[in-house]
Image (spheres, rainbow, N blue to C red):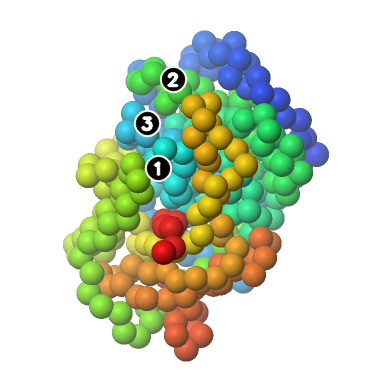
Amino acid sequence: MARVSTQRTARRRRTATAAALLAATTTAALMAGCSGGHPQDDSRGNPRTPAPSQDAAGGSVLAVKIDNAPAARPHTGLDSADVVYAEQVEGGLSRLMAVYASRLPKAVGPVRSARESDLELLGQFDDPLLAFSGAQHKLLPLIDKAPLTPETPDEAPNAYFRGTDRSAPHNLYLRPGRLLSAAPGPGALTTGFRYGAAPEGGRPESSRTVRYPAARFTFSWSASRHRWLVSMDGTPAVTTAGERVAPATVVVQYVKVRPSAFRDFLGNNTPYTETVGSGKAQVLRDGRVYDVGWTRERAGDGTRFTTADGSQVGFARGQVWVVFAKAT
């Protein structure tokens, strides 16, 4: 039975045994949620998402931490997200967070672990559901205290399944419909983004690449599709349904990236991406790039992107990618 997040807000029980519990339920989950060895995906439809209303409040969004190692691609359900955030993680690699409000795909993944930065980023939403595979034990108390509803295989085992098209840990998938009875609607996207006409000025831009130490994203403008075609590490990004990932707006947001108090099992420090503060950004839409500023005063606020005269920048209607790049 689908569960609504408000019914589960009090559940903050977290353990470090999610992987063991998931392994015990893998066989049943595969029978219920996997067909022909591949994760279910309804992303064959129109990948465009409606523009959120500018001020209306909504319910709880679903945020999913998505693996972005080469072995985890292609992704499932990524093009159904309203917003996709890309951040640097250990070893200079990248990870994604997909936020769903307008519609819920049948499956999303592969799902991976949470990071400390996620808690600050998600503070802009009203009791968001955070779906993730787990987290290191020292981070669990912070997740417990955060204003969100954790949804791990331990919290909601029936919502997850293991696909058979790739090896663990790159084969954990989520069924969003097991967490939410319906999409909360675009009014739940309290990101602070403004959708509308493009600002004055800008300059033509056909391709933009953002590099991490061990990963890179390239966004190439397609005039025929009126979208930015995403490539990762030099390879076109497609979903498991064969659809090219193609946001309408791309934001390269320059932020402070500092060491956190956490390390992975190999001893690599986990970067902390600061999304509260202010700085510079570039907005890509309609085949042009605009140099703008960004401001987010508190974790409970959305982010405002403004031109030099203080006017808020309008994003194109459709999916938005925000790529966090290290400010220099």
Choose the circle earlier in sequence order: 1 or 2: 1
Residue located 72% across and 29% down the image: 14
Residue type, numbered disc 2: Ala
The residue under the point 38% across, 82% down is 199
3D distance between C-alphas at marks 3 and 1: 16 Å
Which residue carries the number 2 mark? Answer: 168
Amino acid type indicated by mark 1: Gly
Q: Residue at x 35, y 46 (%)?
A: 213
Q: CA distance from mark 1 to mark 2?
A: 21 Å
Say whether disc 3 or disc 2 marks the residue closer to the N-terminus.
Answer: 3
**Is residue 158 placed above or below 4 in the rendered structure?**
above
Q: Earlier in the sequence, mark 3 or mark 1?
A: 3
**Residue denoted by label 3:** 72
Image coordinates for residue 120, horizontal then vertical, percent: 63, 53
Disc number placed over residue 286 in the picture, else none: none
Which of the 4 image quadrants contains residue 198? bottom left
Residue count near mark 2 (Cα–Cα under 10 Å), binned few <14, some 14–19, many ≥20: few
